[in-house]
Image (cartoon, coloured by chain):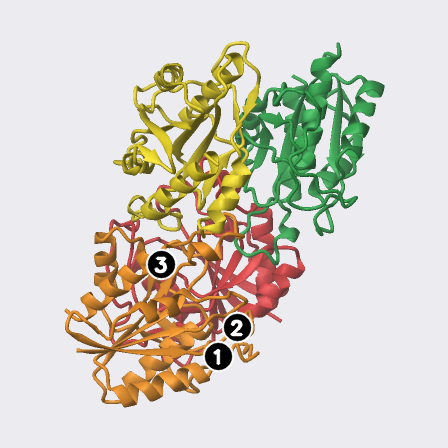
Chain colours: A yellow, B orange, C green, D red
Amino acid sequence: MKILVTAFDAFNKEPINPSLMMLEALPDELFGHEIVKQVLPTVFGESSALVLQRLSEVEPDAVLCLGQAGGRAAITLERVAINVNDASIADNAGKQPTDEPIVADGPAAHFSTLPNKAIVAALREADIPAQISNTAGTYVCNQVLYAVLHYLSETDLPARATFMHVPYLPSQVLEKPGVASMNLDDMNRALEIAIRVIGS
Amino acid sequence: MKILVTAFDAFNKEPINPSLMMLEALPDELFGHEIVKQVLPTVFGESSALVLQRLSEVEPDAVLCLGQAGGRAAITLERVAINVNDASIADNAGKQPTDEPIVADGPAAHFSTLPNKAIVAALREADIPAQISNTAGTYVCNQVLYAVLHYLSETDLPARATFMHVPYLPSQVLEKPGVASMNLDDMNRALEIAIRVIGS
Amino acid sequence: MKILVTAFDAFNKEPINPSLMMLEALPDELFGHEIVKQVLPTVFGESSALVLQRLSEVEPDAVLCLGQAGGRAAITLERVAINVNDASIADNAGKQPTDEPIVADGPAAHFSTLPNKAIVAALREADIPAQISNTAGTYVCNQVLYAVLHYLSETDLPARATFMHVPYLPSQVLEKPGVASMNLDDMNRALEIAIRVIGS
Amino acid sequence: MKILVTAFDAFNKEPINPSLMMLEALPDELFGHEIVKQVLPTVFGESSALVLQRLSEVEPDAVLCLGQAGGRAAITLERVAINVNDASIADNAGKQPTDEPIVADGPAAHFSTLPNKAIVAALREADIPAQISNTAGTYVCNQVLYAVLHYLSETDLPARATFMHVPYLPSQVLEKPGVASMNLDDMNRALEIAIRVIGS
């Protein structure tokens, strides 16, 4: 199986993005699957254009998008992406759209098509806190997942896709009392487990 | 230097107590210091009696008590212990005292005497979330710290003491959505760092 | 204008549901608008069938559904309803569906059609904490909103609709330390403000 | 009975302090008790000096200090005040002490002497969320309570004292998503109930 895995660069004044560190730690082959890695800019439009270009070039069997959801206490697998960009902070290009559709005349939402619940179960089996999330927000993460799922629904590509959000790293919460974090080793383990489930 | 390190057994229906796992992972000698390890029962009275007995037997230079503060997102170093047992749940012997003094006619509180802020700084330096806490609660943890500090203030023993609370392990929050946790490796690192600071 | 306002009966062992108390406190006419009130059972299927029946009988200009989102700190206006029932607790009839579509072959989601952001702005103007929410969950509340929005999108009815979630009442959090609540007077004010905005 | 009630002016960039609004709403006589009201500046040293001056002038039977603990979800009655000023933000005079004793050679702590648990029980009876707190922090609130309790323990004055912390008002959390608040009417009711219990 060929699996496209994406991550984002750092945003919102954070010096790092754990999803990027996870991507860098990921080997090019895992459990016999070919892993194609792609960093996306945390920019509306550019990120979705780039991931769609890579989709058509790579023709993967599965797409696993990674991103950070600072403040969450668990790995979260996103159930759905909705057709709206509504940013409370500017992206890395200074764009801050309000209530704009991602795809004009696109459906209100697309459900993720990879087995989120099986991934959550496997993560918990490995003692990694994990939950299904019913919102990927309305920022760049949601936009990328919507773009991917919409493209796959509109084309003949057989790939399935989902989004995995990770918490802050411990180093990111040193000055954020009360905010949860997760160790990078556990995040890396989580990514390998997700790929194992996706490829099985 | 000789350092007495204590931890508690599991309580409140949790199958494990990370402080106990940390104690078990701790070597008998670290940074040139002799480490004396003691497990305490999560029982009012018995725990404090045992730690005081060990204090007089071991005659340590420092006492570092470990315990779990489920729900906190960071390692917390306790600033103070107060002279009251007031339990919202029963201990492991079924005791649930309400507003009882730990030491009759003892002072309202004792401050910890080991350098909490230096420990917090060293933990953060190592990218481990850490905070000073101003309450060790009114359960068995606080009672042990109060008992130790009171005993040391009443005797000629030169030992200094403090209490380090750790969050839940990831395995303990699988069914607790939204609750923070910390990796055992990070907890073990935190303990070694605390001992390094205490011994310096 | 004719406005259909719905609320739910109590669920999940809570003795009361603030949305029901809000509905009972609501007059039959407000700001010159006719208010039609309907209590819905917290039961999958029955609740949506009843609200659709009332929709066709009443032929309202607007539908405002109320429900409780215990644990949230603010009034939340729901942006979207998704086509899935996935219950973590049983409903009042003992049903607990897992990953079932609300409408077979229905779209993944419908966006609310009443002006959520104008309602949020008016609530804040009145010093009532309010937020846009991007998930109504996957329980009975989401199911009712999805059913209403789907029905309206499929028929020629011109009505617009949204969902307003309210926090716990203070009386509901007496034994839930750390959990936010909101005063019933503020909830009642919020409902009147929402109706004023909807009718303007 | 003569009851001295204190509150603080606004601090930390908040335009208001609910404790001050509660004090202003309080009548000069309640349940047959004489109420003496005193606003304190949110300034280390000045606040404690002023409250001690008022204590000797007024010779009250009870002292109830009010303050804001933004972020808490319930009214909290403080069990204990500790002998340390350790400020994470500057006070209204720009002072930010670190680990300084409030009273040189004073005891580590004083317990509150008014019946906190009876007040909590009465508040809950009135459907107002209330808890015992084991830390009043290490800012100006704790300093005032420590100063009052220390002065009373050192003199022949028979007065008893405690501290009641209140949450944010709804208007204070409009831009603080997820943060709990409490209605001013409920705070005012809480203050009257506390005075009723204190005077009984």
Q: Amino acid at mark 1?
A: Val
Disc 1 target residue: B43
Disc 2 target residue: B87
Lateral position of residue D43 relative to residue B49, left or right: left
Q: Secondary structure at mark 3?
A: helix
Lateral position of residue B38 relative to residue C97, left or right: left
Q: Position of residue D69 (x, y in %)?
A: 44, 53
Q: Amino acid at mark 3?
A: Leu
Disc 3 target residue: B184
Which numbered disc covers residue C112? none
Q: Earlier in the sequence, mark 1 or mark 3?
A: 1
- Tag 1, which chain? B
Where is C59 relative to C21, above or below? above
Q: Amino acid at mark 2?
A: Ala
Q: Secondary structure at mark 2?
A: loop
Lateral position of residue C173 relative to residue D102, left or right: right
Q: Earlier in the sequence, mark 1 or mark 2?
A: 1
Q: Residue D83 is drawn in which quadrant?
A: bottom left
Lateral position of residue C141 relative to residue A162, left or right: right
Q: Residue C90 is drawn in which quadrant?
A: top right
Estimate the spatial distance between the alpha carbons at disc 1 and disc 3, rounded to whole Å: 24 Å
- Residue beneath the point at 57% across and 32% down: C135
